[in-house]
Image: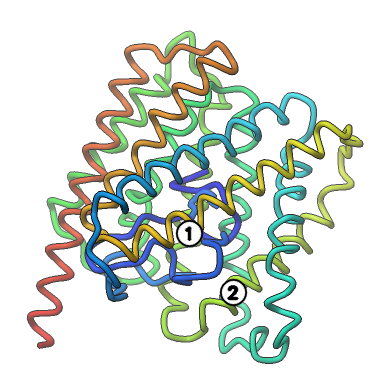
Amino acid sequence: MPPRAWPGCRETAHEGGSPCYSSRLPRIGAVSASHPTAQRAPAEIAAPTLADEPLRGILLVAAAMALFAVSDAVSKHLSAALPATEIAWLRWVGFAAIMAPFVLRAPRRILRSRAPWLQVLRTLGLLGSALFFIAGLRYLPLASASAIAFAAPLMVTALSIPLLGEKVGARRWAAVAVGLVGVLVVIRPGSGTFGPAALLPLLSAVSWAFGMIVTRKLGGLDAAPTTMAYSALVGLAVLTLLVPVGWTTPTLPQIGLAAGMALASTAAQFLVVTAYRLGRASVLAPVSYSQLVWSGLLGFLVFGNVPDAWTLLGAAIIIASGLYTAHRERIAYRTRRAETG
């Protein structure tokens, strides 16, 4: 899922930031899982680095991205037999099971929110991201879907203007435009390979970005465990209402794969949390794009899909624009810190 495959969060952090603001219980959280990614805007998080071991941090992030790719590959495999709502529901069941001990330990404290409706909106955004991405995996190669979904941080920049009233400079607008060109290169509208399914990962990216925008509004209002609990409980409740539509009883092997999918995402979240305690986010964030390499490799080994030249070119453009956006975010963050002392 965008930067996404896990219900609670999945965004990439920038300078001085944590990847998902529960520094944390399992990044627990799509994305994406995505995604991912609760959290402040990446550039606005100022969680301290507890150690300075960048090499270990890089290796841990790389391993986490491999596990996220494995989770997405399992989702794609299951999508051939199960509807997207059911796959997402199975994932959220695992997520809720992991969160249950934390909630039961102090239910009143964890479930007390200053902005419950924002929590619901955030969860709906991440839930939509997961559903669109899983639905797209049924029809698209894993590498293509992942490349398109990685445009999500660019969508955050675009949506921050109408929804948050933020000012975005010409350079970041240019990066967004270039990133969208990369998306167009991957999906190639007007070509014989283009189909409506190619829009599903893009809708996933937009939904994830909406969830992150709401996350910014939540910044400072609720503690991370509260956001995680709402993500688990609200997401599971919504999916439980949707899952009977088109229900297909999973086989025992499919249930086992779903459990492995949730386990891979959870393990990846722990690796990400540990990594961002060992190294600077500005060093580790670019490593997140290694997920595209793993997705391409798994797509070839498991599904026999070989990324074509257009997909590789589009992915390169999306990565470049994403890295440049992260660079501009770091500059803006440092400028704000200098102005406020």
Q: Residue at x 77, y 55 (%)?
A: 239
Q: Quadrant of residue 169?
A: bottom left
Q: Which mark is residue 169?
A: none
Q: CA distance from mark 2 to mark 1?
A: 12 Å
Q: Quadrant of the C terminus?
A: bottom left
Q: Label 2 is placed on what type of residue?
A: Gln
Which SS class for mark 1?
helix
Amino acid type at image mark 1 = Phe
Which residue lies under the disc numbered 1? 210
* Residue situated in front as seen by the camera: 231 or 173: 231
- Along the line of sight, the residue nearer the viewer: 169 or 130: 130
- The image quarter containing residue 48 is bottom left
Give above or below for 111 relative to 204. below
x and y percent of residue 165 in the render?
Answer: 31, 71
Can residue 81 be seen here? The reply is yes
The residue to which callout 2 is attached is: 119
Q: Position of residue 81 (x, y in %)?
A: 79, 26
The first of marks 2 and 1 along the sequence is 2
Left or right placement of residue 229 versus residue 310 in this view = right
